[in-house]
Image (cartoon, grey):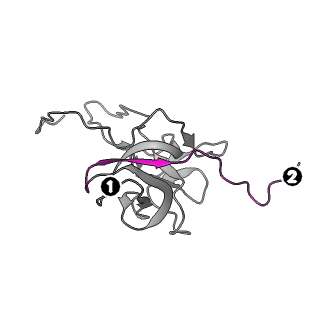
Amino acid sequence: MTFPNKINYSLPSGYPGDIASANPRRSAISSEAGFRCGLGGLVVGEFGWVQDDGVNVLNSASASNKNAVPTGFVIRDMTAILQGFNEEGSMVIPSGFPANLMTGGDYWAISSVDTKAGDAVFANPTDGTLAASGNITGFSVARGGPAGNIIMISAPCAPMPAQANTPKS
């Protein structure tokens, strides 16, 4: 473990990937196998895309569809994942671990640009970070801030429209 090199005088509003309110939340529905972090792991507090196999999740869009909407936002629900003795913690969920992607609710994130309430949230399709342009996410800024600071993003929890091929009763 490294020696602390700074002191915070006050606590931040939240940490990237944390749930930001007691409002309802919605997660992406996985197959029977569930979602798993792909090769290289999955960074918390950024957007994730389910890859073409339907199981692995990465912080980048699949090669077959770079313009795809992210499957969801990677939340910080698995804390203290340490795989080795004396290993430091990180914001990366290791490869092969279960992944939980959120499609609705309020979450804390870091933006690369200045934001204000009501701005649309875009994801960089190569690394899943919040960006000024890129893939639309369905999230919007609930509480903005300057670039590099923590912001609150929000998406509605209403169910998605049914697919056209859904059997009718």
Label 1 secondary element: loop
Give, as a three-letter code, the residue at label 1. Answer: Ser
Task: Pinpoint residue 151: horizontal percent, then vertical percent.
Answer: 33, 48
Q: Nearer the viewer, residue 102 or 48?
A: 102
Query: Label 2, label 1: how many angstroms apart (C-alpha)?
Result: 42 Å
Q: Quadrant of the N terminus?
A: top left
> Is there CB contact under 8 Å for labels 2 and 1?
no
Does the magenta run of residues contain 61? Answer: no
Q: Chief secondary structure of the magenta span?
A: loop
Give, as a three-letter code, the residue at label 2. Answer: Lys
Label 2 secondary element: loop
Quick check: 27 above or below 131? Answer: above
Q: Residues within 10 Å of mark 1 (few under 14, many from 20)?
A: many
Q: Which residue is mark 1?
A: 111
* Segment tinted magenta in the rendering: 146-168
Quick check: 43 above or below 129? Answer: above
Q: Residue at x 14, y 33 (%)?
A: 9
Q: Which image quarter: residue 164?
A: bottom right
Task: Pinpoint residue 117: horizontal percent, then vertical percent.
Answer: 38, 53
Judged left or right of residue 150, residue 107 is right
On residue 60, the disc is: none
Q: Nearer the viewer, residue 103 or 153?
A: 153
Does the magenta run of residues contain 149? Answer: yes
Q: Residue at x 60, y 42 (%)?
A: 34
Q: Which residue is mark 2?
A: 168
Task: Pinpoint residue 131: horizontal percent, then vertical percent.
Answer: 36, 62
